Amino acid sequence: MPPKTKVTRDMIVLAAVDVARQDGVDKINARTVAGQLHCSTQPVMYHFATIESLKRAAYEVVDRMHTEFLMDTPPDRDPILGIGLNYIRFAVEEPWLFRFLFQSGYAKEKNLLEMIESEALPPILQAMQEGLGMDLKTTKDVFLTVALFAHGYASIIANNALEYDEAVIARHLERAWDGAVLAASKEEKH
């Protein structure tokens, strides 16, 4: 008889991410996660004293996945537009995970202004700052404008209220970007 597979903490977290991906964060519980792993609920409860702690661990994994997804822009595309489109595309490809990240209350940051100061944002801001040639404060102002626009699009799409049309969205995102950069440039002069 082969030895039983040891169910690790990481396996449990990834199974919870799979549950969230398929059915939403509210469906994460010991039974659904154990079902993903084809095991009893005992390993899940052994590694996680509460389902809330499991959901938080899954959130951290999804947050890292999202950051990697954002930064994976084609070399021939403007990195800023690419990041914005990836943000929206994540909502298209992973609507339940998008909702988990931004509509479930699990984010450490409670609003967009707090998000600008989050630990995950420096690589994105650095890419934007290099592309803009502006100081960090101005870059954050531009980011805020574009992020609000992209988040609105992504939220509407993730909640099945809009069809994804990349060409139209890219054109709108470019306009939002151009407007934010123009406004920031005018403010810098004054």
Image: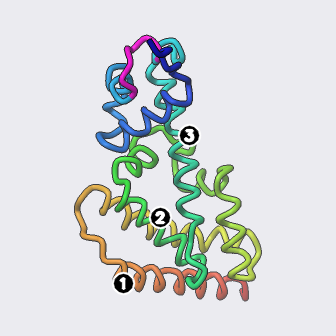
**Which residue corresponds to mark 3?**
60
Amino acid type of the residue that numbered disc 1 sits on in the rendered structure? Ala
Label 3 Cα neighbours within 10 Å, binned few <14 / some 14-19 / many ≥20? some
Instruction: Indicate the secondary structure of the residue bearing disc 3.
Output: helix
Residue span colored magenta: 37-43
Q: Which mark is residue 87?
A: 2
Separation (CA) of disc 1 from disc 2: 15 Å
Separation (CA) of disc 3 from disc 2: 17 Å
Q: Is residue 38 magenta?
A: yes
Q: Earlier in the sequence, mark 3 or mark 2?
A: 3
User: How many discs appear?
Assistant: 3
Quarter of the image where one finds residue 74: bottom right
Quarter of the image where one finds residue 186: bottom right
Residue at figure coordinates x 48%, y 38% from the top left: 106
Residue at figure coordinates x 51%, y 32% from the top left: 56
Residue at figure coordinates x 38%, y 63% from the top left: 154
Q: Earlier in the sequence, mark 1 or mark 2?
A: 2
Residue at figure coordinates x 51%, y 12% from the top left: 46
184 above or below 8?
below
Q: Is residue 169 magenta?
A: no
Separation (CA) of disc 1 from disc 3: 32 Å
